[in-house]
Image (tube, rainbow, N blue to C red):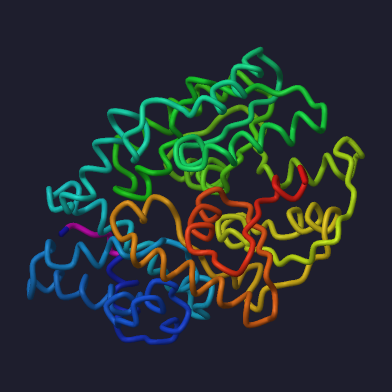
């Protein structure tokens, strides 16, 4: 397996260390040492020493959510996300990617999304067609919202309609490459998808990313891959915060008391934590989760639910338990994927998106 020297250094350091053992959402859900960053580093190290084959650790490599909680917590600067992504890329180049992952990759390449869907729900199609006219602002929905959270995508459009701002939504939205980046890392296919999406975005002055995952990809990762767009890039939460501040999105505070589930892409990768809070506070009484902002705990996603659904359900249930332990029973999300994951296991708590809160 061909890994960079930098990657090898991170593997060798992390395989001896348990310091982030307690904060891995997958490790906490499964209760297995192999699911932790240290366990993953140990497996990769064994492959490097030719003690085992690469195919023997790939299931474990794909258990990682790339959420970066381990990276954020590490006081010495080691990065398990780095060696996890490099190992996924190396496996793809060596033909050692598990068949169930390759099936998702093939769907991305043929349909533009890992779910293999070729048509949007009718309500979303109608909502998009109402904003087909070219404006200066593009609302980029992303694959998860379009194909796994259709109702929430419609609500994202409705909120901007409520604010009365002109914007465009594309029926033929180019896939961002975020799903490929997760599955196979910096492969040529990933770069090509990013470049095609960037070219589409170049036609607009501003691109507003509804999904934090796509925002992180284009505001951070794409530049590392040599892909950029001339458009000004904004997260959906930052865009809404500006609309509320400017009075374009009228706010009326309701009687709900809520906690906010920080998406790690916003809180850790983009260091954006207060914009969503300013919006939520305008519509509800905001309390905090025990672990919030940069320390947020990932609550699952729809992509990993395609291949380890039971684990993702456990991850979401544990995050709900975090809220319930504080006596809170309404969780607000800013990620369509986490919304779906939490909603799927919510029993005696209410799961809302920021759009739900505003439109109510």
Magenta segment's dominant SS is loop
User: Magenta segment range?
Assistant: 2-6
Residue 109 image position (x, y, % from top left): 29, 32
Residue 6 is at least partly visible in this image: no
Place residue 231 in its image quadrant: top right
In the displayed structure, would residue 214 be above or below residue 24?
above
Membership of 280 in magenta stretch: no
**Tally of numbered tags:** 0
Place residue 253 in its image quadrant: bottom right
Q: Nearer the viewer, residue 152 or 54?
A: 152
User: Which residue is found at the position 66% from the left and 67% from the top?
Assistant: 293
Residue 104 image position (x, y, % from top left): 27, 43
Residue 197 image position (x, y, % from top left): 47, 28
In the displayed structure, would residue 297 be above or below residue 271?
below
Taking the image as shown, residue 197 lies to the left or right of residue 255, namely: left
User: Which residue is found at the position 30% from the left and 82% from the top?
Assistant: 33
Question: The N terminus is located in which quarter?
Answer: bottom left
């Amino acid at each position: 397996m061909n890994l960079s020297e930098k990657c090898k250094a991170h593997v060798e350091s992390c395989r001896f260390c348990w310091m982030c053992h307690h904060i891995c959402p997958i490790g906490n859900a499964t209760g297995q040492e192999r699911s932790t960053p240290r366990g993953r580093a140990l497996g990769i190290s064994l492959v490097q020493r030719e003690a085992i084959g690469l195919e023997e650790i790939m299931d474990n490599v794909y258990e990682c959510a790339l959420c970066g909680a381990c990276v954020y917590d590490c006081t010495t600067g080691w990065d398990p996300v780095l060696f996890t992504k490099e190992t996924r890329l190396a496996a793809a180049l060596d033909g050692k990617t598990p068949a169930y992952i390759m099936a998702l990759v093939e769907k991305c390449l043929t349909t533009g999304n890992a779910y293999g869907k070729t048509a949007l729900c009718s309500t979303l199609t109608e909502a998009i067609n109402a904003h087909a006219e070219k404006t200066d602002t593009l609302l980029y929905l992303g694959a998860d919202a379009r194909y796994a959270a259709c109702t929430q995508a419609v609500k994202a459009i409705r909120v901007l309609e409520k604010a009365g701002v002109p914007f465009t939504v594309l029926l033929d939205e180019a896939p961002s490459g975020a799903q490929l980046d997760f599955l196979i890392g910096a492969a040529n296919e990933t770069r090509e998808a990013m470049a095609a999406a960037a070219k589409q975005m170049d036609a607009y002055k501003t691109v507003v990313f509804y999904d934090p995952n796509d925002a992180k990809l284009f505001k951070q990762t794409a530049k590392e891959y040599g892909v950029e767009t001339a458009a000004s890039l904004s997260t959906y939460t930052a865009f809404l915060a500006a609309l509320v501040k400017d009075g374009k999105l009228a706010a009326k505070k309701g009687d709900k008391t809520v906690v906010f589930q920080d998406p790690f892409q916003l809180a850790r990768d983009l260091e954006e934590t207060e914009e969503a809070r300013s919006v939520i506070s305008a519509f509800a009484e905001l309390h905090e989760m025990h672990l919030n902002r940069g320390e947020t705990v990932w609550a699952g996603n729809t992509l990993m639910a395609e291949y380890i659904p039971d684990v993702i359900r456990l991850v979401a249930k544990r995050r709900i338990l975090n809220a319930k332990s504080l006596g809170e029973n309404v969780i607000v999300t800013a990620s369509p994927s986490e919304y779906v994951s939490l909603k799927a296991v919510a029993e005696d708590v209410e799961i809302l998106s920021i759009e739900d809160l505003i439109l109510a």
